Amino acid sequence: MVVTVGQIALIIAFIVTFYSSLAGFFSGAIKNPKLSKSGRWGFYSVIPLLLISTATLIYSFIKNDFSVKYVAENSNLAMPDIYSWVAFYSGNEGSLLYIAMAFSIMGGISLRIISNKLLKSAPYFLGIISLILLFFLSVILFLANPLETLEIIPVDGQGINPLLIHFGMFIHPPFQMLGLISLAIPFAIGVSTLLAGEGGKDEWVDQGRRWGMISWLILTVGLLLGSWWAYTILGWGGYWAWDPVENSALMPWLAMSAFIHSIMVQKRRGMFRMWNILLIIIGFTMAQLGMFINRGGPVPSVHSFGESSMGWVFLAIMGITLFISLVIFIFKFETLKSRRTLESFFSREAAFLAQNLLFLLIAFVTLWGTVFPIFSKTFDEKTMTVGQPFFNQVNGPLMLLLVFLMGIGPFLPWRKASWKTSTKMMRIPIFASLVSIPFFIFVLDIQKVWALASFAILVSATVGIFQEWTRGTISRHNKGENWGLAFYKLINANRPRYGGYIVHLAVVMLGIGITASSFYSIQNDFVMKPGQTKTIDSYSFTYVGKEENIYSDRKEQIAEFKIKNKNKDLGYLYPERSYYPIFRISATKGAIHSTLIEDFYLVPSEFREDGQAVFRVLVNPMIIWMWLSGPVLILGTIFSLIPSKSKKNKSLLSDVLKNKFKVG
Amino acid sequence: MLIFISVLLCCIPIILIFYPLINKTVTTSNQDVVDESFQRRWDSIVDGLQNAELEFSIGSINKEDYKWLQKTYAKEAVEAIKEFKMSVLEEKELIQEINQEIAKLKNQYE
Amino acid sequence: MIYIWVKNMKIKKNFLLAGLLLLAIPITLIACSTEEKILNTQRINSLNKSLMCPVCPGESIDQSQNTLALQMRDIVVVKINEGKTDQEIKEYFVSKYGPVVLMEPPKKGIGLLAWVFPPILFIITIAVVYFILFSLKKRSRKLQDNNKNLTEEELQILQILQKETLSQEDIYSISKINGEK
């Protein structure tokens, strides 16, 4: 009964969204504010409806109501209670409902803001986000309904995929899915600006930047959480496998990383208008492509939502959206022509363009690698795999180039740079970078070329950032402020810039973690009997014993280890391995001892009948820097989003002048 | 029971959709787009100048380039003011014309 | 005298930097050329990472917990102890499961296409960057370098732009601007 309420709410939501999309476009065309408002409020009304639908689904999970087909497929009686709250988005149908619900909320918030700030485009914005929501609601209602009931109620459900019983389940999927769909908002801002004929102005830049950064932030957090989750649960000691679904989330992230930079060029200089619209269209298309790869399964992936034949729907909508957006672009692109010009090749604008294209290059190379298996199959019969080695070799250098640009970019001022001044600024960072090379080689024993290059570039990027902070503080101090105040005011006076630097520092931290662990991880498999001690690197670990627990859905084996590093006692670790007979999956949980320098990672590969067990041990240098970069990145992004002093109280210059002109 | 709930659920959107249509909505003031455009241009010039000053104080740009930037921004500001003035005056003329027409028509019908 | 000293220092600084840069290259090359003894375990691990488990969705036999993957890992160990090279071991698996078992496309035949495409795309990207920048710059009017000094009006407006709050006088000055040279 409960889900029927949810079902009704869904149907009503569908009808209302249909109305608001029509209302949006019509009211924009005939310029009727009443119809606009009606459409808007209609959109807002969908939010409680979808919350109700979601609530009924969650309720069914909590109550183990197996009369609901989706609940029966994705949970069972043995599932820990707390996971009932999140199991609803673990499968295809439920995740779609989550996306629709979350998008309605985010869309509603953005709608409210856009209708106050971008009056002309607002009706079209409403139309576009309504259409997108309508698509999801249609798929849910007609193809993949999580609220469907079963005639015969099973006694117990199938259970959730065991790999999802992990803390990460609470945060990674919601963020990741929200991140992908949140790209719809800057997309809608851009396209609605075109439809409203406002392309010639840069009004949309502020909101475009804001929502672009918000969706970028959500995507980044989703990706970081996913890597962290993979690292701690999947038991292979890695965090990124260039899996098709991972790639499909990376591609829009790359496009948005490009966008949040090039939108600054438009803000500062009124340039790159066409480019930004195209870029946001590409970004959203990639997000939709991501949804297709995730649900259509054209390429095999560990992430696939199981067998699902509705992928083609997502491919189709991606194609349609792309086609329509490009048509609108072509019709309106005359309005986008800016009269600004590029003053010098050697300027920040030019550097941003190069950086943008580099981001897109990486995205397209990733796309190429992801779809190549399909390509090779159609042409050659034999499928080929494109895995980690390919992507690491191809994307690695490109990403390093990007970090290099990140380091020197800030030394190029807007409009034009003089060669002398820019090289003067680059002197210290490059010097530091060069000096660090022998340090890395002789002191830290780093002799792999790519690792060296990477660390050297990271050094130059870091020094470059601190150089500006220091110089800026000094110059303010010389004007009379004390050191603390000077620094504070420096940062505060230009939040986008300095927030950006904080984010770049987070990227450096990420780079440190990735470089160190990619090149200097040590891995080995050990066969051990209880009581034995083995060593790896400077660690010694003793297999004390194992505990076995049998539950209704799994057999759990927990090993106890005592570890030492250089004879210093580090305590006990408890790596686990569980076997789920229904799913025929073994899930492991690695035991990790983390320090800033390295992670000691222990996971059981196999428990043999004769009492022996095989353990995989890894020593991963500097991995924790990757996870630590997350909070820094979030801080930097939020800081750069804080709006500057509101001009509400000051009478607008334009108003005052206008009166002067009218009178004079 | 189910019907009762469905009717209840329907009410939310129905009320929200029809209320604006029926009500005399206070039409949001037709903000003068030209106003906004000038304000935004002005703000971005101020922003740009501040940024240039920052970069000069750090040493990213030399004195010559800084002076050149100042001139460019000043020129842009002058241009923006000119355009804004012209468009305000144009609008003023337009309104005057319309008022004249209305006055004429009024006279005709009196 | 001091001027010459400073100028010398500047030249010295640049020489120093250039010298360091030149030194860095041979140091790096020498350091990196020392042959690293590749242990068997490292060979096994890297081979495991470059072979895919045929029945798992996109996992290498190093990653996967599947029984077939574990069997394949054992075979790798056996073959390494038999003295086979990396290439031979890979070919063995390809003959059993097809080229799909390799984690990266072979650098021949249609697989080569996979590898060639990215560098080509890179070159195209550089060309596109250049083309866009060039077309943007073409439209630029010649920088009026002749008169760098600000006109009185421009000076006035500049001072106003740099103020935090504008007074009535400032507003008045702005309204009087008419862009005369």
Image (cartoon, coloured by chain):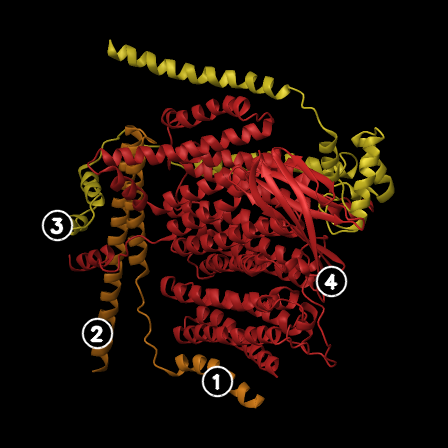
Labels 1, 2: front one: 1
Label 3 with label 2: CB-CB less than 8 Å: no
- Looking at the rendered structure, whether the residues under marks 1 and 3 are on a common chain is answered as no
In three-dimensional space, the C-alpha distance between marks 1 and 3, rounded to whole angstroms, equals 58 Å
Q: Is residue A375 visible in the rendered structure shown here?
A: yes
Q: Which mark is residue A307?
A: 4
Please tell me which residue is depicted at 34% across the width and 16% down the height of the picture.
Answer: C10
The residue that mark 2 highlights is B103
- Image quadrant in which you'd find residue A211: bottom left
- Kind of residue indicated by mark 2: Ala
Q: Nearer the viewer, mark 1 or mark 3?
A: 1
Question: Which residue ends up furthest to the left in the rendered image?
Answer: C169
Residue sitting at x 42%, y 15%: C16
> Mark 1 near mark 2, Cβ–Cβ under 8 Å?
no
Question: Which residue is identified by label 1?
Answer: B11
Chain C as rendered: colour: yellow
Say which residue label 3 marks. C169
Residue toward you, A141 or A245: A245
